[in-house]
Image (cartoon, rainbow, N blue to C red):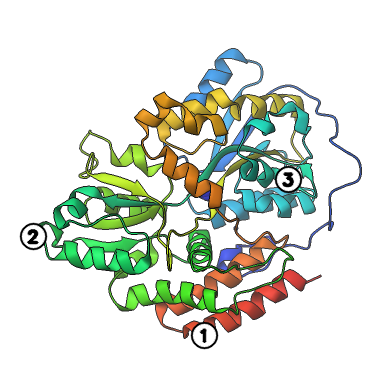
């Protein structure tokens, strides 16, 4: 997920340890290498919270009995996924074949020559949303292919907002006022206002980056310089830290990852939830697992003075430099990243597809009314800091943002320390 996450040197960056030394500052010489060898491979991905990936592999395996794909599931936490990917690469193990990477890791993995450059012409990248297709590039070369994409959305209890006579909020202040109106209702008793992903892991980097972008700022600018010593960054972090102080965010949500918040929303204890699109299908389940089926809507994230900006998430498929049977791996990525499979993923899991045409398909729009909102969010989504030493960068963000949210540092001190630590991560040789 982030994707989703997700969706971090032989140790976990999210716990404050550093990134490995990059093996190169750019791509290896030459173009895509030869992809030879056929036989069994592995698909390595974060925990499949949708329960649908194995079914897709079963279809491939039935048609390719001599080239079966085995699913290897890593932890739900994006940080822990990244740690295990890096450990496998550093030992040059062939246990991992196709890697389902958070797009923000592609630069780091390409720079360290842990993944192979791919033949870009083999994939229909021109049919994908341009910003999404570019997430697989490093120095203008294709190292990964989008499997799905992701943008944060505001899930809200439509039944309660309608009862209170208020519209979905466009700004943070409007959201707080909507919460106050809902809390006046008998039905609003025991319903918390808002939650995102606030535990100290990659989700906090995502939520902090969104808050800064939604206040008009950047975390790292186009020239690659840290830029959190700004008024916009202060406004963004004040929104997050202030939310815990004034009760807009529940205390429990300080430890929320995606699934924690999803369960709270489905239990009916959240009015607003910042979440990825996959929540749509699960929250609409009619098997008794969701108390809010048919009672919620989806809107763009709110911002300081208007509609906010999401971080760009999703998963990109890459081939491990150390894998065997790379011809099979390349063919499998072609199948797994196809528009047909993206459509199936959308229909079954409500995950965001990378292909532009699917957002305008009338049948899909009828089934998933939020697709227009999602397309709008994706069109303005901002990537997290594109830094080769991403482990150090995300650790700097997480640790200092968490200190502000917990009240251990003032907002100004947290941003000053973050600016210093981010600059060190970017400039480190």
Q: Is residue 353 left or right of residue 170?
A: right
Mark 1 / mark 2, whichever is N-terminal: 2
The disc placed on residue 186 is: 2
Residue occupying the point 61% across, 55% down: 83
State the separation of the CA atoms marked 1 and 3: 35 Å
User: 206 or 52, which lies in front?
Assistant: 206
Where residue 156 appears, as percent x and y from the top left, is 29, 52
Residue occupying the far right of the picture: 29
Q: Is residue 111 left or right of residue 298?
A: right
Which element carries disc 1, helix, strand or loop? helix
User: 125 or 7, which lies in front?
Assistant: 125
Please determine whether, in this image, residue 214 is positioned above or below residue 374: below
Answer whether residue 45 is visible to the viewer in this image.
yes
Mark 2 / mark 3, whichever is N-terminal: 3
Which element carries disc 2, helix, strand or loop? helix
Which residue in the protein does label 3 denote? 137
């Amino acid at each position: 997920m982030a994707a989703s996450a997700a969706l971090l040197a032989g140790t976990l960056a999210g716990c404050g340890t550093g990134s490995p030394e990059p093996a190169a500052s750019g791509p290896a010489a030459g173009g895509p290498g030869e992809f030879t060898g056929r036989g069994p491979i592995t698909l390595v991905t974060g925990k499949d919270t949708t329960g649908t990936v194995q079914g897709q592999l079963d279809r491939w395996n039935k048609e390719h009995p001599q080239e079966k794909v085995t699913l290897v599931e890593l932890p739900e936490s994006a940080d822990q996924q990244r740690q295990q990917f890096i450990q496998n690469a550093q030992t040059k193990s062939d246990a991992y074949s196709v890697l389902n990477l958070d797009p923000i890791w592609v630069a780091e993995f390409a720079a360290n020559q842990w993944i192979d450059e791919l033949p870009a012409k083999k994939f229909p990248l021109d049919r994908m949303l341009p910003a999404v297709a570019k997430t697989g590039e490093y120095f203008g070369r294709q190292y990964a292919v989008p499997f799905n994409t992701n943008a944060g959305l505001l899930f809200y209890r439509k039944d309660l907002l309608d009862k209170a006579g208020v519209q979905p909020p466009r700004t943070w202040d409007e959201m707080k006022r909507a919460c106050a109106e809902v809390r006046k209702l008998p039905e609003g008793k025991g319903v918390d206002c808002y939650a995102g992903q606030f535990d100290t892991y990659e989700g906090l980097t995502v939520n902090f980056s969104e808050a800064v972008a939604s206040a008009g700022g950047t975390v790292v600018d186009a020239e690659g310089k840290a830029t959190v010593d700004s008024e916009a960054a202060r406004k963004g972090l004040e929104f997050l830290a202030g939310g815990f102080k004034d009760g807009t965010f529940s205390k429990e949500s300080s430890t929320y990852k995606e699934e924690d918040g999803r369960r709270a929303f489905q239990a009916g204890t959240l009015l607003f939830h910042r979440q990825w699109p996959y929540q749509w299908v699960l929250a609409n389940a009619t098997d008794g697992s969701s108390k809010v089926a048919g009672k919620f809507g989806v809107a763009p994230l709110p911002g300081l003075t208007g509609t906010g900006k999401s971080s760009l998430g999703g998963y990109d498929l890459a081939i491990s430099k150390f894998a065997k049977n790379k011809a099979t791996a390349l063919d499998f990525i072609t199948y797994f990243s196809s528009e047909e499979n993206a459509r199936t993923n959308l229909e079954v899991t409500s995950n965001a597809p990378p292909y532009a045409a699917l957002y305008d398909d009338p049948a899909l729009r009828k089934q998933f009314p939020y697709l227009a909102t999602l397309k709008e969010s994706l069109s303005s989504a901002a990537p997290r800091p594109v830094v080769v030493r991403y482990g150090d960068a995300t650790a700097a963000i997480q640790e200092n943002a968490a200190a502000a949210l917990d009240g251990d540092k003032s907002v100004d001190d947290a941003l000053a320390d973050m600016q210093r630590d981010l600059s060190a991560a970017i400039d480190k040789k």
